[in-house]
Image (spheres, grey):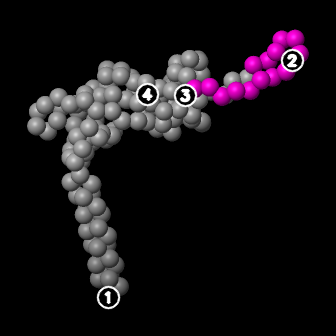
Amino acid sequence: MVRMVAGIAFLGLMGMTISGISKEDARWDKADGKVLLIKRECTFNVVETDGISGKKKHSVEQDSCNATDEFADMRGDEDRSRNIAGKAKISVEYKAVNGSTELAAFELTGRDDAFYTIRKGDKVSLKVSKAEPQTVRLN
């Protein structure tokens, strides 16, 4: 009796999981794309010291992530212990289901691994919204 109840519960969970996957797949198509443009903007904490009085001036600036060597150092670090505060807008072109070439864009943040690794010209696997073909995300 216990085995039968456990088996029925397991099958019920499998059914919910399979139906959840099929609902997700029903809203998105898979497509291969190519990165055309990346615009990364990072937030930097800047500390300037006056050479005469020694006073420190703190400010926060937004600039291209390539404005400092820190981004390049973190980009190559596979075992990152911290993230950069920033956003990247990635423009891609992809082949739609109907065979046409489409343009789209998506955003990443400093918490996404791809924020550090994705480069212009990279081939990427995408999910494309069936309802809004200009809405894409990494697969």
Residue 52 % position (x, y): 87, 11
Q: Are marks 3 and 4 in contact (CB under 8 Å)?
A: no
Pair 1/3: label in front: 3
Q: How many tags in the picture? A: 4
Circle on res. 54: 2
Q: Do the residues labelled 4 and 2 touch (CB within 8 Å)?
A: no
Residue 100 % position (x, y): 13, 31
Separation of marks 3 and 4 at Cα, in angstroms: 15 Å
Give the residue pinned by disc 3.
Answer: 42
Q: In which quarter of the image is residue 121?
A: top left
Stretch in magenta = 48-62
Q: Check disc 1 and give the amino acid type.
A: Met
Pair 1/2: label in front: 2
Residue 28 % position (x, y): 24, 47
Pair 3/4: label in front: 3
Separation of marks 4 and 1 at Cα, in angstroms: 53 Å
Residue 5 % position (x, y): 32, 83
Q: Earlier in the sequence, mark 4 or mark 1?
A: 1
Q: Main secondary structure of the magenta part?
A: strand
Q: Earlier in the sequence, mark 4 or mark 2?
A: 2
Mark 1 nearby-residue class (10 Å; few <14, some 14–19, many ≥20): few
Separation of marks 1 and 3 at Cα, in angstroms: 60 Å
Q: Tag 1, which secondary structure?
A: loop
Give the residue pinned by disc 4.
Answer: 117
